[in-house]
Image (cartoon, coloured by chain):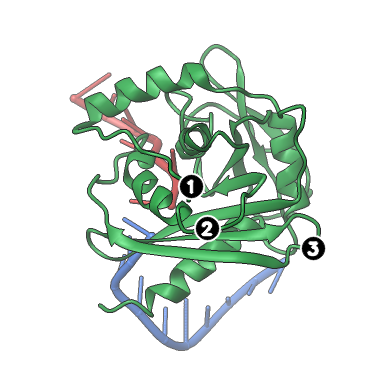
Chain colours: A green, B red, C blue
Amino acid sequence: MNIVKFEKVSDSREAIMLQKQLKSQLILDLPKAFELRTVAGVDVSFPEPGMGLCVIIVLSATTLEIIELAHHFMKVEFPYISGLLSFREGPIFLETHAKINSQPDLYFFDGQGTAHPRGLGLASHMGLLLGKPSVGIAKSHLFGSYENPGLDKGQWSPIKDHTGNIIGAVLRTRTGKKPVFVSPGHLIDIKHSIELTLKFTTKYRIPEPTRLAHIWTQKLKRTISI
DNA sequence: GCGACAG
DNA sequence: ATCTTGTCGC
């Protein structure tokens, strides 16, 4: 069992305090012994108000074949508040994670990593709790300034905070299509986050780990009663 | 006060 | 995220 507990917070004030405290623990470098054999994709859908359905899909990092698929359906307490997404999706993610048998080497989350108001988006928060490398793949902008990248696949431009520090990248994963917002979660740097995002991107805008997790989250949603 | 605002 | 079918365009 993967026993990882999520610190309960009762309101946004406490949530923000926790984020500020946790961000100091982030390590933005790949571990020396990092070996990439499997990668996990995470996503959450909401079949009905107050109920969430999380999916974690584990893929071979070399062939992208599905190694494991786990899901969990439960009540979600925390409301959606911009900047506090991890408090809404974190609990159900950990419950789902307790069901997987493999130990993914890397995790891709549907949201921001360090490109966040307090430097601790969903991917960073979860990576920290797991103690594993994680990357945030967001479909839209949340925080930081940036210029649009070139139109060719692979081109990117930095996302900077008010100080000028680079906290993420706007990456073109498909020529001529809307770019994705990539930022390191935990135990990884920006360069590798970009490199790995491209490595797992096939013919679609969203890289396979997160794209497949989303597809399953929608497919299983119909299996659950409404 | 005004505009922005992951999923 | 979710409510929702077909349709125009690359």
**Left or right: A10 as drawn, with respect to A171:** left
Q: Is residue A6 left or right of residue A8?
A: right
* Residue placed most toward the observer, A178 or A203: A203
Report if the CB atoms under discs 1 and 2 are less than 8 Å apart. yes
| Local SS, label 3 | loop
Q: Specify whether disc 3 shares its chain with disc 1.
A: yes
- Residue A148, how many percent across, how many down? 65, 37
> What amino acid is labelled 1 in the image?
Asn
> Residue at (71%, 28%) from the top-left corner?
A31
Q: Which residue is drawn at 46% across and 39% down?
A: A122
Left or right, A20 with reference to A17:
right
- In front here: A81 or A33? A33
Instruction: Identify the subunit bearing mark 3.
Output: A
Choose the circle earlier in sequence order: 1 or 2.
1
Q: Which amino acid does label 2 sit on?
A: Ile
CA separation in Å, label 3 and label 2: 20 Å
Q: Which mark is residue A63?
A: 3
Mark 3 is surrounded, within 10 Å at the Cα level, by few (under 14), some (14 to 19) or many (20 or more) other residues, namely few
Distance between the alpha carbons at the discs numbered 1 and 2: 8 Å
Q: Position of residue A107 (x, y in %)?
A: 60, 46
* Residue carrying label 1: A2
* Tag 1 subunit: A
Q: Using the rendered view, name the quadrant where residue A135 is placed.
A: top right
Q: What SS does tag 1 mark? A: loop
Q: Residue A100 carries which label?
A: 2
